[in-house]
Amino acid sequence: MLSRKKFLYQASALTAGAFLASAMNNDVFAIFKNRIAPSDQVNVGVIGVNGMGWSNLLAILKVPGVNLVAICDIDKNVIDKRLAELTKMNIDVSKLKTFNDHRGLLDMNEVDAVIIGTPDHWHCLQMVDACQAGKDVYVEKPVGNSITECNVMIAAQKKYNRVVQAGQWQRSQQHFVDAVDFVHSGKLGNIRTVKVWCYLGWKKPIPFVADSAVPAGIDYDRWLGPAAKRAFNTNRFHFTFRWFWDYAGGLMTDWGVHLLDYALLGMNATVPKTISAMGGNFADPNSPQETPDTLCTMYEFDKFNLVWDHALGIQNGLFNREHGIAFIGDNGTLELDRSGWEVVEEGRSTNKIKVERKLRIDNGLDKHMENFVNVIRSRKLAELKCPIESASHIAVLSQMGNIAFRSGKKLSWNKSTGRFTDEKINKKYLAAAYHNGYKIPKL
């Protein structure tokens, strides 16, 4: 583990090397890797390499001194595909360990850090297991699949004192930081409403698919883990798992943790007083997906309202953008999304303000991974861009919206207890049900 190493870290050299490496092929990149002392190398294992786990792996391999030593996935087809792709990248996979059970990967003494890119319902268990094994962790968002899981994950990081970064990479992207700085400048005037939207035309409601036999190479019991036992169905597997409550929380948690995060950062807000939501499967009422394809959630804060609005199969959101955050002030509205930000003047204001569009200038995921590795080496946890406390906070906010929708009630939140004021709601929704012999970790 890295903690046993004596590390002398040259920050400027690493930053320059990471920037150059992002634009170089693997042969040239190897030159920079060889300049990193053996004691300063970071050995990484990846758990779940089919979606964002793979993107995260590609990003972290750009950081000098990082070595891939193991990958884990319950689908052998995915493992074989990734080994072939790594080979094409001139990476020697002959010594790369492969697993279908994450516990085998965590037993490897040479693994310093792990990336968790599995479905949401596995995040808590695997992150806690990794911390207990003495590994540093990069865990995909949303970090927990319930409010209780988020609290457990915070406790695990504190107990085992590990570096834990969440995959909310927009926190490392410069134009998001610049936009929030502008909001904090006060130039927009009094902000009474913040609107956050996610209109994804490319994510269509899923059609009915019959149950089938488990495809060859898939350890389906391991995939289910703590989720309820069900017959195999392709709708509930790989990418579209996110539309079922057993495994995830739909767009509310999938994109909500990214966008709502910056809404709260911009407003210096913590938790709402009340939460209400309305929506349903309006695009295709016959779709088997459980999470709503259309949802509007209202969060009430002391001095402003926060509105979340999402729709699958439609791409024309506010400002003709598929997603974004709008800080609506007396003097103008700042619109922020992954491509950039701008300020649209308020026509009735006597103190009008307008800012032409500022475009994205960097790769947020690459920078987020650089930050993770830097902190692994420095052990300065305060320098993490998205520590588990911040990620859990916004995951809880997103879970609040889903719980308001599922319960059909306007809910009140008690900030001091970290619970809803309605104990019936707490009993039913605060914790995700665990099955198949799994239990939520107790720390």
Image: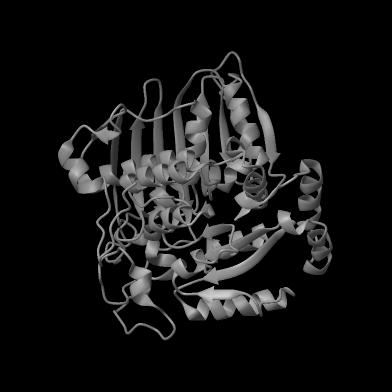
Q: Is residue 58 left or right of residue 200?
A: right
Q: Residue 439: image x %, image y %?
A: 28, 58
- Foreground pick, 86 / 264: 86
Q: Position of residue 180 (x, y in %)?
A: 59, 31
Whether residue 312 is visible to the viewer of this picture, yes or no, is no
Residue at screen point 46% across, 67% down:
102
Residue 263 visible (yes or no) = yes
In the displayed structure, would residue 78 be above or below residue 315? below
Is 437 on the left or on the right of 95, as rendered?
left
Q: Quadrant of residue 68?
A: bottom right
User: Looking at the image, how many numbered discs can be counted on the residues?
Assistant: 0
Q: Give the image location of residue 103, x and y in percent.
A: 44, 67
Foreground residue among 283 and 334: 334
* Towards the viewer: 261 or 25: 25
Q: Position of residue 405 (x, y in %)?
A: 27, 45
Is 258 located above or below residue 224 in the figure? above
